[in-house]
Structures are given as structure tokens and as C-alpha cells.
Image: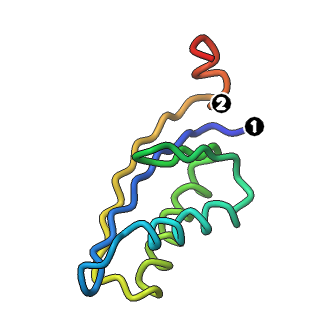
Amino acid sequence: MANTLMSIQIIPKTPNGEDVIPYVDKAIEVIQASGLPYVVNPLDTTIEGNMPELLQLIEEMNNKMMAEGIVSVISQVKFYHAEVASMAELVKKYR
């Protein structure tokens, strides 16, 4: 079972001031490829996993941004860490 929820917002600085959304889509592709459960929200994406794999995922997303020609990237990250962490359990009273 997962012990960590991570919400991440990737804010890329594009080379020529282009729209960031295509680059954010590339970051979400990295999340999809991880096989971890995730939910895309309007301003961030929440991923369920264990701390080491989530930290690795941050590095992979940042590396993807650099490979796509991004000048720099800000990764705003929030963690919820517990013995068992579940997106479904955390929000079940609201669904």
C-alpha cells in the first residue's frame, strides 16, 4: 500500500514565452508512464505512491522538461505522508 500522496504543479519557463500547457502535458505523460494512481486537477496533479518513487518521479518530470528545451522549471510540491495514504480515503466524505 502507498504511504504518501504528492500533489505537484510544474511551472516551466518556456524558451520563447510559448504557452506552458503542452509542456505540462509532457510532465503528465511522465506521471502516466509511472503506472502510479493519479488525478489531474486544474492547478496540480495528485499522485499516490511511496516516498522514494514519488521523489524519483519529480526528478523524471524535471529531466523531461529540460529535454524538451525548457529554460528552467519550478516544481511546487505538497506531501501527505502516513502509514497508509489513499486519495480515495482522504476525500471519501466529499464524494
Relative to 54, 79 lies left or right: left
Q: Residue at x 70, y 66 (%)?
A: 33
Whether residue 20 is visible: yes
What is the three-letter code of the residue carrying label 1?
A: Met
Binning the other alpha carbons within 10 Å of mark 2 as few (below 14), some (14 to 19) or many (20 upward) gives: many
Question: What residue occupies the far front of the structure in this picture?
Answer: 19
What is the three-letter code of the residue carrying label 2?
A: Ser
Nearer to me, 29 or 85? 29
Q: Residue at x 45, y 40 (%)?
A: 79
> Which is more foreground, mark 1 or mark 2?
2
Q: Residue at x 25, y 86 (%)?
A: 16
In the rendering, which numbered label is found on residue 48? none
Q: Position of residue 30 (x, y in %)?
A: 60, 68
Nearer to me, 47 or 85? 47
Mark pair 1, 2: CA separation? 9 Å
CB contact under 8 Å: marks 1 and 2: yes
Comes first in the chain, label 1 or label 2:
1
Relative to 15, 36 lies left or right: right
In the rendering, which numbered label is found on residue 86? 2
Nearer to me, 53 or 93? 93
Q: Secondary structure at mark 2?
A: loop
Question: What residue occupies the far left of the structure in this picture?
Answer: 17
Whether residue 85 is visible: no
Image quadrant where residue 83 sits:
top right
For the N terminus, the image quarter is top right
In the rendering, which numbered label is found on residue 1? 1
For the C terminus, the image quarter is top right
Image vertical order of residue 71 relative to residue 48, above or below:
below
Q: Position of residue 87 (x, y in %)?
A: 62, 31
Binning the other alpha carbons within 10 Å of mark 1 as few (below 14), some (14 to 19) or many (20 upward) gives: few
